[in-house]
Image: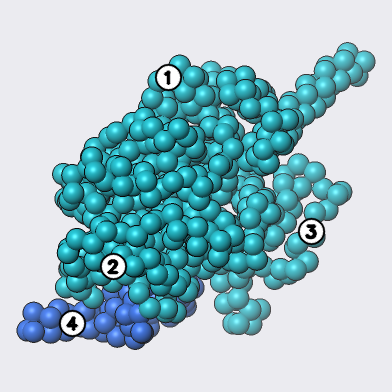
Amino acid sequence: MTRTQIEKSTKKASLLSLHSWSGVVLGMLLYAVIFTGTVAVIAHEIGQWSQSQAPKDRLRHADIDALVRQLAEQTDPKYTEEISITESYNNQLVFFFHTHGTNPSGALDDIGVEYRVNEHNEVVQTRQGFGSELFPTDDTNALGRFLVSIHTELHMPKPWGLILTGILGLAMLVAAVSGILMHRHLFTDIFLLRSARSGEKLKRDAHTVAGTWSLPFAFLLAFTGSFFSFATSFGLPAMAMVAFGGDQKAMIYTLVGEQMEVSETPKETTNLNLMIQDASARNDAAPNNIVISHYNTESASMELFFLPSQGAIISKYEQYNAATGSAEGVKPFVGTEPSFGSLILSLIFPVHYGTFAGLFSKLVWVSLGVASCYVTMTGLQLYAHRRENKLSQWQWLPRFCHWGFIGLPLCSLASAVGFFISSSLGLSTSNWTPLAFVIAAGMVTILSVVVKPITTLKYVLLALTGLMCISLPLIRIALSQTGWISAVQHHFEAVLFVDLSLFVCGALCLYQVVNYLRQKTLSQSTLPEAV
Amino acid sequence: MNRFFGFFRNQRFWLAGPLTTVVSMLCMLAMAVYFPPGVGNINNILMPLLMFPIIWACIFFYAYLTQHLKRAWFIIFTLGLINLAIIVLQFTLVKGS
């Protein structure tokens, strides 16, 4: 062997070791982040599905101008500095009249009054407080928010959860890059599944095939994900320290593109409905949210956020001078002037969330997310399998794999059951959704300890997951009375999509269980003959 | 215990682990000073943040795969020092003004 050959083989061994360890040390947490990330891609659809109410585009069709005027009259004038308006998943309009301040933990925050207005234009709920207290207790989106929060922060306190998910993003980046570097036959590996193989060898082939297909996806997601985590946890404050001498407010003004000089001279804001109609007509869609700044002053402005329209990739901010009613064009994603940084950032969002081609791109992202979950699972299982046969102290690892890999989807489904039951009983879904997850996690842990045969444990957990998948759409239909016919009539794709996905997943799980039971029965019946 | 924590005595662990993380953070922060801010005045904030995972990955793979550890220590340490000097200079200038 020449020196170059020795160096090459040492590097390959090092890369293989790095690839294995980046997966083994952080494998289970990485799986949790990838699995919940896959679910988070359709968080908007899950939000709509959980409320079973077809979107009515009220931000486009309701009399927003009259409602803002009416609510502004009964609100402390200091909170009219900024008014954000969104439509909740149960078709209520949510008006948050607020100003900016510092919350008890010392962080910059919004503080103000939130009004929820029903379809008859009646205020059904009024809450006052900091934005960081009000948004996490919004019961209408408790399920989607809970699942997304596992993905972004693993339910750990700030900023530690974000830092941990950032590290997991880097670990995924390491696994993806080392995977690319150590592949000698990257393209042939895409079709490496050899039918003659079985058991561990087949699993290794499947790991390589799924890993090779999802390599570009894993690389993109790891890069964008670690950017999101690190930028929000320590990146932005640290950059503010260097670029703005520690003035976070100045940095936010620069990034958000707010006016530094504001005139508080009173001037009646023009009819908001006209601006909304104009922007909606130009984008051929209802706005996703609206922000009105400095209402009833000379500096009044209005921003309408639109998700990517047909054929577009990037979301849009339409800006208006609300004092005169004139359109000021499309505002850059970040800052006041179009820039390269803003363009790149506006592309990162659709790439990470898979929103660049509607439900189709989301489906592709979900499929690749499932492939990445499979790669993480099989990687750790291969490692467990190899150790299980050699060392007695590694025997806990396969059990741990089943606990996590099947347990997490099962607990997520249980949190959805908790959401529906608490919602129907009039309890706080924000409390009961995570509580149902914790209860299910406790039960899965007990099962994992009590059920000794590892194969039995696997199929018990799979059977429970399958049953839960199939029962969830039935529970939803029973509690909401929004069936499939009604969903088709109202073009409510989210309900059909989530219900059908659950049925398919449930059927796949139960098929595996039935197959296992059939094989077990067959082997038992043939055993006496063999003896 | 030694079997599990033996990597603490490995030079490469300290080079590819803590030092790489600190140096890539210093690179990101120093870029806020010298990266062109552009018309929107935000490129020097956003681009370093976007590039942080790539900077980290480049330094990490170099530190992990190099056969010349001493040279790698020197290069990464010098890179860190240069970027630290840029940040210190920026703070001194801001205080002076």
Q: Are marks 2 and 4 in contact (CB under 8 Å)?
A: no
Instruction: Give the amino acid type for the residue marked by disc 1 in the picture.
Output: Gly
Query: At 54% across and 20% down in the image, what residue appears?
Result: A447
B94 lies above or below A511: below
- Image coordinates of residue A390 in percent, x first then y, are 60, 40
Of marks 3 and 2, which one's residue comes earlier in the chain?
Answer: 3
Instruction: Give the amino acid type for the residue marked by disc 2 in the picture.
Output: Glu
A54 lies above or below A22: above
Of marks 3 and 1, which one's residue comes earlier in the chain?
Answer: 3
Q: Which residue is mark 1?
A: A426
- Image coordinates of residue B64 in percent, x first then y, are 45, 70
Left or right for A307, reference A326: right
- Image coordinates of residue A148 in percent, x first then y, are 47, 44
Q: Which residue is mark 2?
A: A258
**C-alpha separation, residue under disc 3 versus residue under disc 4:** 54 Å
Q: Are marks 3 and 2 in contact (CB under 8 Å)?
A: no
Q: Which residue is mark 4?
A: B90
A485 lies above or below B14: above
Instruction: Give the amino acid type for the residue marked by disc 4 in the picture.
Output: Gln
B42 lies above or below A456: below
Query: At 82% across and 24% down in the image, what residue appears?
Result: A519
